[in-house]
Image (cartoon, grey):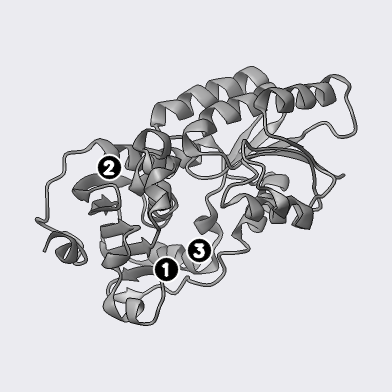
């Protein structure tokens, strides 16, 4: 049976991935919302979808479909809005009699998850979140390999992600920590979830550097010691990457060995939607450790480069 979807944040960067996923699982996008009307991408997937730039009219339309038990009544809300709106939009979805599929980060603070659990109980609806790296074949293989190693073994891990952004970034909601959660939350939360997924419980978190454009620190997991570095500043790219004209650098090494996971990202949202419709989606509790991790990074004291810090930090602090 075809499932009906409504999408909040249709003009956002990640929205086309969700439209593609809805199409791939043979769903139907019946309504979309965004304050911006730069949403021509909808024509590539669901040209018949109703579109709204005002939440109040979107709300009225969705409610009308629900009360009339219309054939286009919404089954799932896909939430791609700015991070600080996720909590409110998930609540709206549940109270509208639908389940929510929310882009990462699910929320900005751990206590928001507790609040959403209460709304789930009140409404009988479910919240699912996009934790796409858990579905990546290379990450699943790494997790299996780690599980086979002796229980007391600690793996030495370096996580590096630099995705260059222009001046616009800091002028948008993404540059406002209260709205995005800061750099570690906005570009790193799915990596922190992946580390927890692969290496177990988080035991310690240290922050060595935190600015508008770059963050770095150390995490101790049950089965790994992790030095991490995240940045949107192109000046932090390795020289060979810059020389080649590339603006993104992504690397995970375990015991000095590179984990190759650059390919396969584009289909992970489709896989995520397939898992949700099959009853195997990632629920609220699955997001808690990653959200706790980024909230701690946002609020922890910055110690500077000392102890086990990421080597890329030398370039920042030189």
Q: Which mark is residue 140?
A: 3
User: What residue do we see at 62% from left, 55% from top?
Assistant: 269
- Mark pair 1, 2: CA separation: 28 Å
Q: Quadrant of residue 17?
A: bottom right
The first of marks 3 and 2 along the sequence is 3
Q: N-terminal of the two: label 1 or label 3?
A: 3
Mark 1 = which residue? Answer: 145
Residue 13 % position (x, y): 56, 52
Q: Which mark is residue 177?
A: none
Q: Which mark is residue 297?
A: 2
Q: Is residue 126 above or below residue 165?
A: above
Snapshot quadrant of residue 6: top right
In front: label 3 or label 2: 2
In whole angstroms, how far apart are the C-alphas of marks 3 and 2?
26 Å
Residue 42 in the image: state x and y as whole percent: 74, 51
What is the CA distance from the residue labelled 1 to the residue labelled 3? Answer: 9 Å
Looking at the image, residue 121 sits to the left or right of residue 176; the answer is right
Bin the neighbour count of mark 3 within 10 Å (Cα to Cα): few under 14, some 14-19, many 20 and up. some
Is residue 124 in sight in this rendering? no
Secondary structure type for disc 3: helix
Q: Residues within 10 Å of mark 2 (few under 14, many from 20)?
A: many
Question: Which residue occupies the foreground of this view, 215 or 310?
Answer: 215
Q: Earlier in the sequence, mark 1 or mark 2?
A: 1
- For label 1, the crowd category at 10 Å Cα-Cα, with few meaning under 14, some 14 to 19 and many 20 or more, is few
Where does residue 195 sit, x and y in percent of width and height?
Answer: 38, 55
* Residue at image location 54% in from the left, 20% down from the top: 118
The residue at 72%/46% (across/down) is: 277
306 vs 210, nearest the viewer: 210
> Where does residue 287 sit, x and y in percent of width and height?
47, 41
Q: Is residue 4 left or right of residue 197?
A: right
């Amino acid at each position: 049976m075809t499932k009906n979807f409504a999408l909040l944040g249709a003009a956002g960067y990640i929205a086309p991935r969700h439209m593609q996923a809805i199409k791939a699982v043979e769903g139907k996008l019946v309504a979309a919302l965004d304050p911006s009307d730069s949403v021509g991408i909808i024509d590539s997937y669901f040209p018949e979808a109703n579109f709204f730039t005002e939440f109040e009219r979107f709300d009225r339309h969705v409610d009308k479909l629900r009360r009339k038990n219309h054939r286009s009544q919404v089954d799932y809300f896909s939430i791609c809005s700015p991070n600080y709106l996720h909590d409110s939009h998930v609540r709206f979805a549940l109270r509208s009699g639908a389940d929510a599929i929310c882009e990462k980060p699910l929320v900005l603070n751990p206590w928001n998850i507790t609040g959403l659990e209460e709304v789930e109980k009140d409404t009988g609806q479910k919240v699912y979140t996009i934790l796409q790296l858990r579905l990546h074949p290379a990450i699943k293989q790494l997790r299996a390999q780690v599980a086979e190693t002796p229980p007391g073994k600690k793996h030495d891990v370096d996580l590096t992600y630099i995705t260059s952004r222009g001046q616009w970034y800091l002028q948008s909601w993404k540059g406002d920590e209260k709205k995005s959660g800061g750099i570690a939350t906005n570009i790193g939360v799915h990596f922190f979830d992946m580390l927890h997924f692969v290496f177990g419980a988080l035991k310690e978190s240290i922050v060595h550097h935190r600015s508008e454009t770059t963050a770095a620190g150390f995490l101790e997991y049950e089965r790994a010691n992790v030095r991490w570095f995240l940045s949107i500043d192109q000046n932090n790219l390795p020289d060979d990457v810059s020389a080649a004209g590339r603006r993104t650098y992504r690397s995970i090494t375990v015991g000095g060995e590179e984990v190759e996971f650059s390919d396969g990202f584009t289909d992970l949202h489709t896989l995520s939607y397939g898992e949700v419709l099959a009853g195997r989606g990632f629920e609220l509790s699955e997001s808690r450790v990653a959200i706790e991790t980024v909230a701690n990074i946002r609020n922890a004291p910055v110690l500077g480069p000392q102890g086990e810090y990421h080597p890329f930090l030398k370039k920042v602090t030189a």
